[in-house]
Amino acid sequence: MRYHLSRKFALLLACAMLALTGCSSDFRLALPPISVEIDADGYPSVWGIPLRELIPSSRVFDANTVRQLSDADIQHIEASWRPEGIFLWGNGKPLTPIVWDRSAFDNTIKLARRLGAIDEGALPLVNTGVEIMRALQASIIVRLPLKSGASPIPPRDPGAPLPAAGSSSPTVLVVGLRLTFDDNGIPSVDNVSLRDLESLGLSGLSLPRDTIQQLQRAGIQHLTLRTTPEGIRLWVNADPLPTFRWSKEMLDNTAQFVAALPILDSGLREVLRVVLPLANSTDVHIVLRFPTGGAAAIPEP
């Protein structure tokens, strides 16, 4: 009985939220910004309330990591969930965000359902959560201890416009690749199976057979990735997914921020520092095709 009541309650919530957040509605749910301060030992305080004594397991970082982050002059990180996407700032500078429109957002939920990541029995509650997430506006800023002698860096102006996509830059790298996987997960390029090229170290591109079967059951025939002046675009079949948006400024900021993160391997930091600023100078088009299992072919986007 308790189960049926919860299902009915979830259905009522879903219907109420769907009514509030119809396609033509301007409904928004804006929460107050959450301010988190990390002390030298890695324990957080939320809105000035220390959690160290209330929740002993609330430690976020160890003291050594906090010291490393502070020494790298990383003073604060902000994340903002908006109806348009997830936006990030490091020391007040915009980093590369993930953005979406209604179609891309819905396609992501649909993909999760097709892959079995969402329990169909909880679908009314999931629909309610989806509508709340569509309307939600919430930000969190995490502040770290200031290193000795450093000048405070002001956080971003909350009233400023969200960072916009950039314009195209001269292309320095062109990559085009179409991999076609067979029923056993072995890819081929232009009908040349990579099984025949294992001596070149390409065998790692193969997929497990059960992964191929799961993709077939979900009706996923191809995945497409393209770089554009606005960022990286992704499709499942012909359905667009959220986009990694960028501009030269955001890529440079992200590269500098990542290169300063001591928690990452030094080699990886150096690679990202060099590669990220070049991203909007690339023309990349990659397609991964999977067996259709006899279903009608879906055109590529």
Image: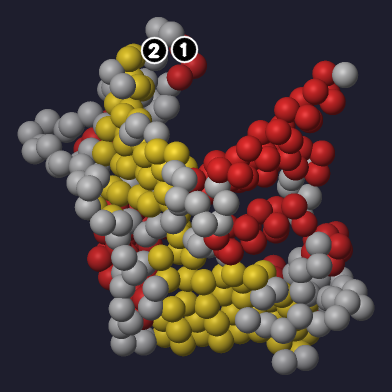
Q: Is residue 196 left or right of residue 57?
A: right
Are there few (<14), some (14-19), or many (20+) residues within 10 Å of tag 1? few
The colour scheme used here is secondary structure
Question: Looking at the image, which residue is at 31% across and 21% down?
Answer: 47
Q: Secondary structure at mark 2?
A: loop
> Which of the image's four quarters has the N terminus?
top right
| Residue 295 horizontal/vertical position (percent) | 88, 77
Residue 202 is drawn in which quadrant? bottom right
Q: Amino acid at mark 1?
A: Ile
| Residue 117 horizontal/vertical position (percent) | 73, 47
Q: On residue 242, which mark appears?
A: none
Q: Secondary structure at mark 1?
A: loop
Name the residue at the bottom extreme. Answer: 190
Q: Is residue 32 left or right of residue 296?
A: left
Disc 2 to disc 1, how far (Cα)? Answer: 6 Å
C-beta proximity under 8 Å, tags 2 and 1: yes
Q: On residue 55, which mark appears?
A: 1
Q: Is residue 64 left or right of residue 299?
A: left
What residue would you read off at disc 2? Answer: 52
| Residue 113 horizontal/vertical position (percent) | 75, 52
| Residue 242 horizontal/vertical position (percent) | 53, 62
Residue 236 is drawn in which quadrant? bottom right
Question: Looking at the image, which residue is at 67% across and 44% down?
Answer: 127
